[in-house]
Image (cartoon, rainbow, N blue to C red):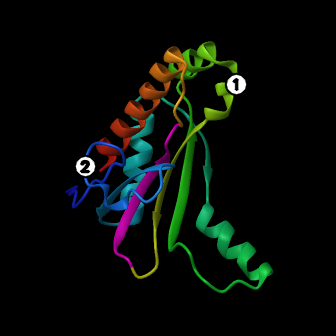
Amino acid sequence: MKKIITACVLFGLSMPALATDAYSVLFKTQGDFSFVRDSLQVAIEGKGLVINHTNLIAGMLERTGKDLGATQQIYTNGEQFEFCSATISRAMMEADPHAITMCPYIVSVYTIPGDATVYVAYRKPGPTHNPALQKALDQVETLLTEIIEEAL
């Protein structure tokens, strides 16, 4: 059974309690990290999208932290899925070729030591004065939100 305890989406859908910065959209749920991660992967692939790469962020920080003499564990688990939508990305880059920086999209799923919450987040596209680009960026956000809501 999937059970959402809380879904906080910055800038609009609900509780701004986590709205400390304008750079991300954050959802949270209670449950098993692996189950949420797998559900997120299924939701991405269910949209007909291909995950290009999975970044194992928690492992990388753990490994490199030792080399740096860092002892703080930042994440218990932490991964990112990279993927794109050919349709939306094409519209985005036709509107502004410099929007290449917005592709691929990345959705992160992670847990923090001492916290039973599983977090799922994505980077919020910045504002633009280009109406065609804004339309495409809005479509990116809609897609990412739909994927996360389906996974949760």
- Alpha carbon distance from label 1 to label 2: 31 Å
Image height check: is 94 above or below 46? above
On the image, numbered disc 2 is attached to which residue?
Answer: 14
Image height check: is 136 above or below 112? above
Frontmost residue, 144 versus 63 = 144
Magenta segment includes 131: no
Horizontal and vertical percent for residue 125? 52, 37
The local secondary structure at tag 1 comes to helix
Q: Give the numbered dot on residue 133.
A: none
Horizontal and vertical percent for residue 90? 59, 17
- Within 10 Å of disc 2 (Cα), the crowding (few <14, some 14-19, many 20+) is few
Identified by mark 1, the residue type is His
Identified by mark 2, the residue type is Ser
Q: Residue at x 51, y 49 (%)?
A: 23
Horizontal and vertical percent for residue 10? 36, 49
Q: Is residue 48 among what the camera can see?
A: no
Image height check: is 27 above or below 101? below
The local secondary structure at tag 2 comes to loop
Frontmost residue, 93 versus 35 = 93
Q: What is the tally of numbered marks visible in this picture?
A: 2
Q: Is residue 17 among what the camera can see?
A: yes
Start-end of magenta stretch: 115-125
Image height check: is 106 above or below 65? above
Q: Residue at x 34, y 69 (%)?
A: 117
Q: Quadrant of the N terminus?
A: bottom left
On the image, numbered disc 1 is attached to which residue?
Answer: 98
